Amino acid sequence: MMFIADNVNFLTADGLKFTHPLHHLGKSTNDLPVLAIDSFRHMYVFPHSVKENIAKSSLLKQFIDDLHSGKLHREFHHGPDPTEPPQITDDIKVMTNNDQDAKQPTSPPESTFKKLKPSRNRYTLVRDEL
């Protein structure tokens, strides 16, 4: 635990007195003990059983490393990272007459950037406004 103490401040609290924060984490007093990181933006709950895995310092170190790498924040907003890379298949499908009912690929929509121009409501020296 000493390798972690330089990067993290530990705080312990009585879960019976602090039931409101437990409620926000989706936990109750029946789930105690709970290990969580409060980053002042979000609270991240330790994903493993605290009772069984707290002695495994590698899991705790990985949890804190995930905080520092941004993985916990990314997964908080976008869901868990995929565990397996997507499989790429080299299969080439030959279209036959029976496949004509299949949905044809569409072209990308027309760009709106070419329609952009200065606003008529802005002040400019080009028009007689002043």
Image (cartoon, rainbow, N blue to C red):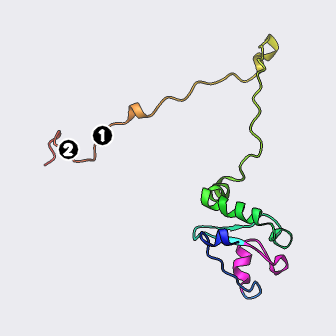
Residue at 76%, 17% (x, y): give it.
Answer: 92
Q: Where does the image place residue 105, in percent across and percent down from the top left?
A: 66, 23
Of pointers 2 and 1, the one earlier in the residue sequence:
1
Up-down: is 126 above or below 99? below
Q: Secondary structure at mark 1?
A: loop
Q: Where does the image place residue 11, in percent across and percent down from the top left?
A: 66, 80
Residue at 80%, 66% (x, y): give it.
Answer: 56
Q: Where does the image place residue 60, in percent across and percent down from the top left?
A: 73, 66
Could you say which disc has been placed on residue 97 in the image? none
Residue 71 is drawn in which quadrant? bottom right
Up-down: is 78 above or below 64? above
Please indicate whether residue 26 sits to the left or right of residue 117 in the image.
right
Q: Is residue 61 magenta?
A: no
Q: Secondary structure at mark 2?
A: loop
Instruction: Give the residues in magenta.
Output: 18-35
Task: Name the amino acid type tagged 1.
Answer: Pro
**Label 2 Cα crowd, 10 Å radius (few <14 / some 14-19 / many 20+):** few
The residue that label 1 is drawn on is 118
For the residues labelled 2 and 1, the Cα–Cα distance comes to 10 Å
Quadrant (top left/top right/bottom left/bottom right) for the N terminus: bottom right
Could you say which disc has been placed on residue 124 in the image? 2
What is the number of callouts on the image? 2
Please indicate whether residue 74 sits to the left or right of residue 55 in the image.
left
Up-down: is 18 above or below 35? below
Task: Name the amino acid type tagged 2.
Answer: Thr
